Image (spheres, rainbow, N blue to C red):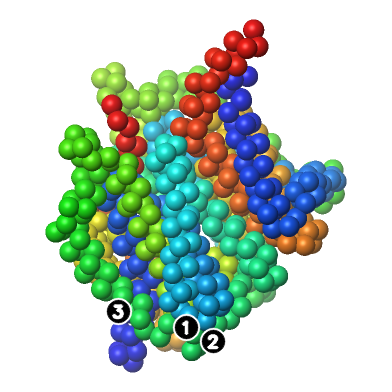
Amino acid sequence: MIRQLLESTLRVSTPLIFAALGGMFSERSGVINIALEGLMLIGAFGAAVGTYMSHSPWLGSAAGMGAGVLLAALYGLFVIRFRANQIVAGTAINMLALGLTPFLCKVLYDVTGQTPAIPVAERFQSAPLYLGWIMVALCWLWLKHTRGGLWVSFAGEHPEALDAAGIRVNRVRWAAVLVGGALAGMGGASLSIFLASSFSRNMTAGRGFMALAALIFGKWKPVPTALACLLFGFAEAVQIRLQGVSLWGGKPIPVQFIQILPYLVTILVLAGFVGRSRAPKALGITFRRA
Amino acid sequence: MIRKLLQPVLAVVLGLALGLGVTWSAGENPWHVFIVLGKGAFGSGYDFGMTLFYATPLIFTGLSVAVAFHAGLFNIGAEGQLTMGALAAAALGAIWPGLWSPLAPVLAGLAAILGGTLWGAIPGWLRARRGSHEVINTIMLNFVAAGLASYVALYVLKNPDSQNPETQPIGAGYLIHKFGIFGGAPVSLALPLALLAAILVWVFLWRTVLGFELRAVGQSESAARAAGIDPGWIRIIAMCLAGGLAGLVGVGEVLGNAGKFKVGFSPEYGFIGIAVALLGRNQPAGVVAAALLFGALHKGAAALDLETERVTQELSLVLQALIILSVSAEGLWSWLKRREPKFASVQS
């Protein structure tokens, strides 16, 4: 049973890891990403449609990432180009994805809120699980040891300094937001063609926000963030395992308390009760050249 | 005045045009979709009543977001606050069903305010005293509230006569008056209450010292501090007020409609409240107007599933999202504003 629980933890934390890494790119560069939920949702949809059409999960996940990039581009257009408030625009992007996906299901397949089921053989078996951890290592190396990683960090911490060094801050942010969209899209893809067998309405069900919580819990750093995803994934796995199980006196165990745990610890960590989590300094502040 | 109105109105037109453009690209006749929306929202007394029914909670959540905004805070937590407010009102009515009118609804209304206030006070206090950002905290608290509410509805106050996750019905003395002229649509006293709340918020923000201090903190924390205002304390008060306003959603839902707390009763009233406040320019009158518009979109879109071939009721979400995006795009409008003098000179 322990083995089962661990396996299930690794599986359900995979979408969180991709999405949280995507959020990390964007937030480290100074752009808040409340829109992760919507980016994941559109990614899940794109991947399900892509896999159903191409019969290949690889092409499908590429479609999911593409959908994530497209929606992230719309987000970037508004928050970077039009200087819209990042929280307002992020909320709008989430609504857009929530409304657009069932509508597209109807247009493409004439059913409300679901894509056709994908046979087991055409779905991912375990690839996203390994890919997720490879991505964690790559992101860590990239942020720490490359010039691009340094630019992203500076865009989020001291955009003026980056600008003074002759690097266009908003170009760096654009790149970070788009890469973030691709990763969040992959997170959604691992929901629809790895954990499930099709896209269904609002299938992310708050996982984008949970990825955001993991990002904060992990102090905006790749490895701690991934470990936070693992912890939250464990909570989800335990909750799935305990659903309907009854212990004392035939009463079912209230899984709601396990459900809210990730959100509670995030609040505590952010408030400095358990360690301290500090956001990038210029997070949420639109950059305009003087 | 006219110029102030111009931007939100243009944003609505732009958002609607883009959204209907989407339906056109799906092979629908956008004009037909528009007519279906309009008929669905205003076609009969009942339809208009449902529009008002949906607009009522949006007035509360819109005011909630607006009050916090004037104090420089982003209240993304209206969803959690309204959940706690509705839960508190329903819990009182279920635990003490024998209470009589008019005391019962008044107490339940206060319980709703209290539940929401508590859920607003937490992020307010965390921001003021621990320095953690209210956006993240309110988002997290939304999920905590949802978890708690479903726990209460499933285990503590479960309705034994229903398969759905909901609490026991409240006592008959709690139910508030419904207006008969809307063909059975649940338009209750909550609507005049919402309008009263809008007036009170206006009086508070622009005619009281505390309201002035609240806006001062929102405009410039350092200036407020220099004037002897404690910004931390003001932020806590602002979030309490925001929470209480959102909690009042419980009055219309629990006392005026369902008679109990139903898990998932809110189609994201809290999030749409952000859009309502933004479109209403954070002014109480603007909030009421924007709530009516979004209520109409929500009601109108319900007919789309049946009346069109390919468009689903989720179109209302798409339209709302596009309207928010268009109104939020500062850069787009400043471009427009730069052009304004030219138009003016041509006209004169």
Q: Which mark is residue A130?
A: 3
Label 2 close to label 1 by CB (< 8 Å): yes
Circle 3: element type: helix
Instruction: Return the chain for callout 1.
Output: A
Q: Residue at x 48, y 89 (%)?
A: A121
Circle 1: element type: loop
Instruction: Return the chain for callout 3.
Output: A
Residue B237 lies in quadrant: top left
Which residue type carries mark 3? Tyr
Residue A274 percent coordinates (x, y): 20, 58
Which residue type carries mark 2? Pro
- State whether residue A234 is above or below residue A37: below
Q: Distance between the residues labelled 1 and 3?
A: 15 Å
Local packing at callout 1 (Cα closer than 10 Å; few below 14, some 14-19, many 20+) is many
Q: Distance between the residues labelled 2 and 3?
A: 22 Å
- State whether residue B208 is above or below residue A85: above
Q: Which residue is drawn at 25% across and 45% down?
A: A156
Instruction: Return the chain for callout 2.
Output: A
1 or 3: tag closer to the N-terminus: 1
To the question of a shared chain for discs 2 and 3, the answer is yes
Residue with the mark numbered 1: A123
Q: Is residue B326 left or right of residue A141?
A: right
Q: Is residue B264 left or right of residue A193?
A: right
Which residue type carries mark 1? Arg
Q: Residue at x 41, y 52 (%)?
A: A34
Q: In which quarter of the image is the N terminus of chain B?
A: top right
Residue B282 appearing in the image: yes
Residue B294 percent coordinates (x, y): 65, 43
Outermost residue on the top side: it is B348
Q: Which residue is drawn at 27% across and 60% down?
A: A217
Q: Which mark is residue A119?
A: 2
Circle 2: element type: loop
